[in-house]
Image: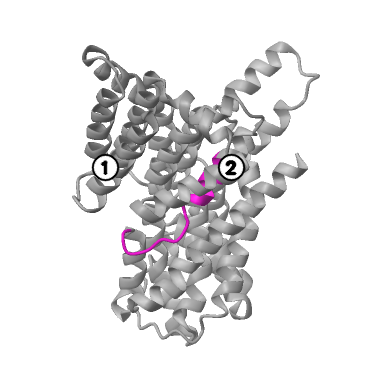
Amino acid sequence: MHLLLVLFGILLLVLLITWGKVNAFLSFLVVSILTGLLLGIPFDKITGAVYKGIGDTLGQLAIVIVLGAMLGKMVAESGAAQRIATTMMNAFGEKYIQWALMVTGFIIGIPLFYNVGFVLMVPLIFSVVYKYKLPAIYIGLPMLASLSVTHGFLPPHPAPSALVGMFHANMGKTLMFGMVIAVPAIIVAGLFYSRTLKHIVARPLEGLVATEKPEDQLPGIGHSLLCALLPVALLMLTTVLSQKTDLPAGGQAVLGFFNDASVILLMAVGLATWLLGVRRGMKLTAVMRIYEGAVKDIAMILLIIAGAGALKEVFSASGVSKEIATILQTWPVHPLVLGWLIAAIIRVCLGSATVAGLTAAGIILPLMTRLHVDPNLMVLSIGAGSLFFSHVNDGGFWMFKEYFNLSIKDTIRSWSLMETIVALVGLAGVLLLNCLI
């Protein structure tokens, strides 16, 4: 009976968001309270469970997401993203133009949220299309695959960061494993698959061709790369160093401090503030306005994550999480595949990768205490599933369709199937890593 109530709650969530067009945060709150009451949580305890779920889920995550948004906004507004893109284009040349865009998308996708990266990079894609007279989908898909994969797989993006916290995974290890899986996923889904789409006719509007900043207003490539990639480099470096067992206790404590994602991102924002802002003549007040804009951009993402945390805590407080774990444990499906599958189903139903990942995590979380599953790989498995088959209920689908001026059929043939390939290759990579570690 309890399992049916949980399914009812998830179905209600899907209907509120998709059919009712209710804001995702409000939908999570309504479903959390209603489901909690149906599951038998006393009236005087239900709001406490919601508050606890929101607080436990956000915690340090709020710092990570906000600082990540600030860094990404600064990289975009300062022209550092344009500098990286220009340098990659010049380095690879016309013959390897797809590789240039793919690598650029990967580098820029690490600090930038997907929507920001899309809007920033699509005009660059169109500039290349008109300059070299090449098919738009063939040229653009590798870069957009890179942006999508970094959004779904890699911290400090919202969903992967939230999953790291929920599963008590290690952000540095998740990032390293994610990089290993992300590269083949991007190459297969973006580079190789795009070569089958040269026949699709896309007529992007010429008005969307990039309006670039003058060369003398751009930061240097060294400073641009340093600010964009510093969080990744420090997280990976400190994670590798933390595996050394011969460090004294004091050294381990210091290393643990600098291995914290919040500390690393704060350092990166500080460096970007100086190198990309103040040092280049930007007033500190102007830099702070950029950061304020970044916070506004991700405010709703934080609330959605908080709402998902409330629903997870309701499942836990009612005891239904243990029942779900007992039932799922009997299924003849590997837990990593199960996490991927649940996320993929919710993604197809809801459209939002973030909501799909967080909801799936709340369902699969009870299994983690009973099975020997690497939490870092579970984060990546659910992240991969959350990207599965983007279609008409996903905002990213419509952004791609309208910017590239495609039919629904061609959008599904290109964008939707690219996302599906990313999800499948991601799952394969997770299962392979699970066999090796």
Specify the quadrant that holds the N terminus.
Answer: top left
Q: Earlier in the sequence, mark 2 or mark 1?
A: 1
Is 215 drawn above or below residue 343 in the view shown? below
Q: Residue type at mark 1? A: Leu
Q: Quadrant of residue 375?
A: top right
Q: Quadrant of residue 247?
A: top right
Location of residue 214 in the rendering, given as x and y in whole percent from the top left corner = 39, 67
Identify the mark at residue 232; answer none if there is no mark.
Answer: 2
Indicate yes or no whether the magenta region holds residue 390: yes
Identify the mark at residue 12; answer none if there is no mark.
Answer: 1
Front residue of this view, candidates 217 and 78: 78
Segment colored magenta: 379-393
Residue at position x 52%, y 55% from top? 149
User: Given the current orientation, which residue lies at the most extreme right position?
Assistant: 246
Is 248 drawn above or below residue 411 in the view shown? above
Specify the quadrant that holds the C terminus.
Answer: top right
Location of residue 335 in the rendering, given as x and y in whole percent from the top left corner = 60, 39
Front residue of this view, candidates 8 and 253: 8
How much space separates mark 2 and mark 1, taking CA atoms? 38 Å
Residue at position x 36%, y 53% from top? 349
* Discs 2/1, front: 1
Q: Is residue 120 left or right of residue 244?
A: left
The chosen color scheme is one colour
Q: Residue type at mark 2? A: Val
Mark 2: which secondary structure?
A: helix
Front residue of this view, candidates 3 and 347: 3
